[in-house]
Amino acid sequence: MPFLYLEGRTMKASTNDIVQETAPKQLNDHNLVPEQIVPGVLYEKRPAKRLDGSIAEGVYNAWITLDNPKQFNSYTTDMTKGLILAFRAASNSRDVNAVIFTAVGDKAFCTGGNTKEYAEYYAGNPQEYRQYMRLFNDMVSAILGCDKPVICRVNGMRIGGGQEIGMAADFTVAQDLANFGQAGPKHGSAAIGGATDFLPVMIGCEQAMVSGTLCEPFSAHKANRLGICCEIVPALKVDGKFIPNPTVVTDTYLDEFGRVVHGEFKTGDAFKTGKDLIKQGEIDLSLLDERVEALASKLLETFPECMTKSLEELRKPKLNAWNANKENSRAWLALNMMNEARTGFRAFNEGNREVGREIDFVALRQALAQGAPWTPELIEDLIPKA
């Protein structure tokens, strides 16, 4: 069958004739606003590849990338707007096969909302935070409602709100140095930006309870074992060879008592040795990119409308829980900016590694047990100062 090269695309001559005869001469634009550049959010269409690695001319994968590495790719108000627009653009693009949702660097995919902005603008302003949470809700809904499959490429830690927007994606492929987890009750919030909706249906109620309340991070290996991540790849190279995360148990499944230890962090000297080994090596995300591209290539070899319908149905457990709770969660989070969130975000923003970034929780509970009100003086007394 002869091929015709047309407008940068290689197409069967017969198919091209059909397109010329039947396709509208002018295509409608279904985006709400013209394409915009929003600082902190990168949008790029990269050529899609077939399973054999060759370029599928005229078809692309949309890469939506968080670009705020100095603040661990946390999202600001403007970045939230940018993500809404980016996911809508990718969803509407006729030539997009899949969306790759990721971030720059190798330290963090996303650590959630920007705590500096939270502490310095939204703390004590519930009416403002309520409006912000409308944007946040729309951002999560834009991911869940995207007509294209969404792959979260986890290039580094995925914590707090970053975990929530990552779980809104359809697939997660991670480098195995990345940590996952929630942070809400440790920093003055609750994980009701999606985690309390998604975690129970993804990893079960008990493990969801552990993650959402204790706020202890877990490894990519454990995330893979629990079912919150479909694939992991090594990222650490030592002496030119890839090795698994040396701070995590990867060579043993059960301990002597029959408890699962695979994916758990090592302890004591073993953990310290692993940290030292990471410092000696180099981080290489080439395998991560290979696996993400391979997954996108598999998605390419499907009927697009059947794919969209499959996504819609398979997302329902997450989507139903999200839609049932997002509005009352928004209201609670706004009001919480008057006390615990006001305190927790300020503590994180104003503290440091030396003095800590968490309040004195015991002192708070002792004060509340005696009926003390949330006064500015109490808040100042609880916050560690840099």
Image: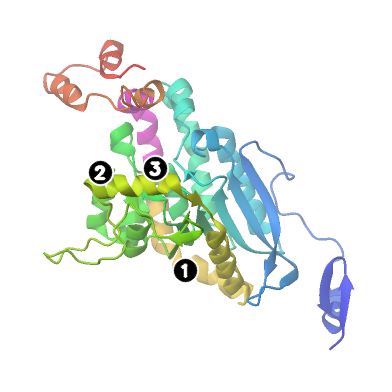
**Residue behind mark 2:** 213
334 magenta-colored: yes
Dot 2 or dot 3, earlier in sequence: 3
Mark 1 against mark 3, which lies toward the viewer? 3
Image side of residue 173 versus residue 362, left or right = right
Residue at the extreme bottom of the image, as rendered = 1
Colour logic: rainbow
Q: Which comes before the other along the chain, label 1 or label 3?
A: 3
How far apart marks 2 and 1 lie (CA) works out to 30 Å
Identify the element where label 3 is drawn. loop
Q: Is residue 257 magenta?
A: no
Quick one: 161 or 29, which is closer to the camera? 161
Q: Secondary structure at mark 2?
A: helix
Residue 343 in the image: above or below residue 164: above
Secondary element type, mark 1: helix
Which residue in the protein does label 1 denote?
313
Q: Is residue 196 visible from the viewing direction of this image? A: no
Amino acid type at circle 3 is Gly
Q: Nearer the viewer, residue 229 or 16?
A: 229
Q: Position of residue 304 (x, y in %)?
A: 63, 72
| Local crowd size for mark 3, using a 10 Å CA cut-off: few (<14), some (14–19), many (≥20) | many
Magenta region: which residues? 327-345
Q: Which residue is mark 3?
A: 160
Type of amino acid under label 1: Glu
Residue 23 at what x, y percent from top left? 82, 71
Three-letter code, disc 2: Thr
